[in-house]
């Protein structure tokens, strides 16, 4: 089960193509980026996750760098299909205790966010300080079986108004405990992916929120049966999502998903397959929906969200156009049924096609870029679901010695299912970051990002800009 968030399939493709995008923004391998710890930044930060629930099954890819874990689609299966089946880690470790290899890093981010609360009428800006530490551990238990741990911890302090954040210790969505087991033709991965984040910008349906802090945990098992040209994948994942702010208890959920895929190598450069999943989402907050008054005026718990069950099925393909260009695509149908007893004002079931496409190219040894597009139904913050189209572009450019430039842009268009707060919206964003390798171990970066949302609902539009400086030291 993959740990990822929005914009969903656009993100999936990016990670399949070894490019990671968050809220349409790129996560730069060059080290350009922001706080990287559950922030409101769209550049280099890590964001909040989805409410879980439903999304098409996919070939999957491990999503480590830009969103809170969810179980919207399978785990590392597709990534293993797209890459050599070599999970051993070599190099990059500075401490070794017997067979256990460890590395550590620390960083400090300073940024100014012009609209932390994503408000049109009352935007609240703040200078944010974000210290963080990270650890990576790799333990080869046998020649082919291993345990790995990636851990990131941090803190965001809002200087202008501390109440804008939860003042919690944050856990990066990149955090993961994973046990890899190889048994003949089978690759089995057992994983746990906890995180605490406070980034509402990952969800395009959210606005006017403060201290949007959530604990997420995704745990499951992923199995690949590798028969060379034929490969089969299946697994199970469970997600628990819990708000650390009582104002958002209506978002607390538990979700489950069972998924499977099968593929065949039809050409040395082309693999095709089928994919499918079944899933359900249950909301913990089941306060009774009540109306009052002679005219049936709603008086209590109108923000309740409805439980759901669903499934999806489709076809996918991936391959290489050349040694420097790879691609992935899929198409299918998804259906999600909602039990409207929690909130009968939110109506409608999802039954729609989905598609995703992405291509990544290494233009030369200095410039790499990727393009992705998708359409699917996703969980909504305030209604049953939203049907969203996403397109994104990202690039990395090594300029001269020790200098690099990264950037990206995205566009989103969505329509929510019927409800009292439903909207149609457009969101567009862009970012750019300039990185400098100060020493062998120290990287500094400057970055800027902007997101603008337009909505059919009064006061649901917003503009957010972020200016930041980031330092990261690898011990």
Image (spheres, grey):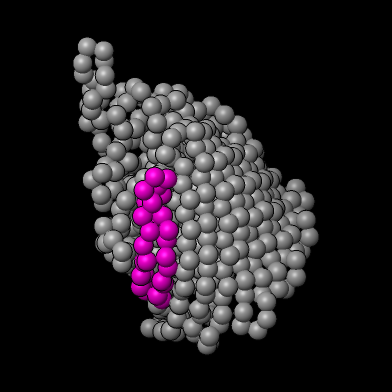
- Asked if residue 129 lies in the magenta stretch, the reply is yes
- Residue 135 x %, y %: 39, 74
Q: Relative to 84, is 277 on the left or the right?
A: left
The residue sitting at 40% across, 26% down in the picture is 419
In the rendered image, is residue 366 in sight?
Answer: yes
Q: Relative to 2, is 28 on the left or the right?
A: right
- Residue 208 x %, y %: 36, 45
Look at the image and tell me in which quarter the C terminus lies. Answer: bottom left
Q: Nearer the viewer, residue 246 or 76?
A: 246
The residue sitting at 37% across, 66% down in the picture is 127
The residue sitting at 51% across, 80% down in the picture is 443
In the rendered image, is residue 261 in sight?
Answer: no
Task: Identify the residue at the far top of this view.
Answer: 294
- Asked if residue 53 lies in the magenta stretch, the reply is no
Vertically, is 284 above or below 84? above
Q: Nearer the viewer, residue 333 or 10?
A: 10
- Residue 192 x %, y %: 37, 57
How many numbered callouts? 0
Task: Identify the residue at the far front of this view.
Answer: 121
Quadrant hosting residue 163: bottom left
Q: Relative to 286, is 83 on the left or the right?
A: right
Vertically, is 444 above or below 46? below
The residue sitting at 61% across, 83% down in the picture is 402
Quadrant hosting residue 305: top left
Q: Nearer the viewer, residue 104 or 409?
A: 409
Please give the range of residues in magenta.
Answer: 107-135
- Residue 403 x %, y %: 62, 79
Q: Relative to 427, is 207 on the left or the right?
A: left
């Amino acid at each position: 089960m993959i740990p990822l968030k929005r914009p969903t399939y656009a993100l999936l493709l990016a990670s399949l193509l070894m490019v990671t995008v968050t809220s349409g923004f790129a996560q730069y391998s060059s080290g350009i980026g922001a706080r990287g710890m559950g922030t409101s930044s769209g550049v280099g930060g890590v964001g909040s996750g989805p409410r879980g629930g439903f999304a098409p099954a996919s070939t999957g890819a491990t999503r480590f760098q830009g969103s809170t874990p969810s179980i919207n689609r399978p785990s590392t299966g597709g990534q293993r299909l797209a890459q050599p089946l070599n999970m051993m880690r070599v190099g990059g470790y500075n401490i070794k205790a017997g067979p256990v290899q460890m590395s550590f890093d620390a960083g400090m981010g300073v940024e100014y966010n012009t609209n932390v609360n994503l408000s049109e009428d009352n935007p609240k800006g703040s200078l944010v300080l974000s210290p963080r530490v990270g650890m990576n551990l790799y333990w080869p238990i046998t020649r082919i079986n291993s345990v790995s741990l990636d851990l990131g911890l941090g803190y965001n302090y809002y200087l202008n108004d501390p109440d804008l954040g939860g003042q919690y210790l944050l856990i990066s969505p990149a955090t993961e405990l994973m046990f890899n087991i190889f048994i003949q033709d089978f690759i089995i991965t057992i994983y746990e992916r906890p995180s605490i984040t406070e980034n509402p910008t990952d969800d395009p349906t959210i606005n006017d929120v403060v201290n949007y802090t959530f604990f997420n945990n995704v745990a499951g098992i992923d199995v690949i049966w590798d028969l060379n040209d034929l490969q089969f994948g299946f697994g199970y994942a469970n997600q628990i999502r819990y708000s650390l702010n009582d104002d958002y208890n209506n978002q607390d959920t538990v979700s489950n998903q069972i998924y499977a895929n099968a593929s065949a190598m039809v050409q040395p450069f082309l693999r095709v397959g089928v994919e499918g999943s079944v899933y359900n989402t249950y909301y913990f907050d089941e306060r009774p929906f009540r109306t009052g008054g002679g005219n049936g005026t709603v008086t209590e718990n109108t923000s309740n969200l409805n439980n759901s069950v669903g499934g999806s099925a489709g076809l996918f393909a991936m391959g290489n156009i050349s040694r420097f260009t790879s691609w992935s695509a899929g198409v299918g149908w998804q259906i999600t049924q909602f039990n409207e007893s929690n909130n009968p004002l939110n109506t409608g079931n999802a039954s729609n096609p989905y598609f995703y496409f992405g291509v990544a190219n290494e233009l030369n040894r200095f410039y790499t870029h990727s393009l992705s597009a998708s359409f699917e139904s996703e969980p909504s913050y305030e209604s049953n679901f939203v049907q969203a189209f996403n397109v994104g572009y990202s690039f990395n450019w090594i300029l001269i010695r020790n200098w690099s430039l990264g950037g990206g842009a995205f566009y989103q268009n969505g329509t929510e299912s019927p409800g009292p707060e439903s909207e149609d919206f457009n969101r567009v964003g862009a970012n750019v970051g300039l990185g400098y390798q100060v020493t062998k171990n120290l990287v500094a970066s400057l970055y800027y990002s902007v997101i603008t949302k337009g909505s059919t609902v009064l006061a649901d539009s917003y503009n957010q800009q972020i200016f930041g400086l980031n330092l990261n030291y690898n011990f």
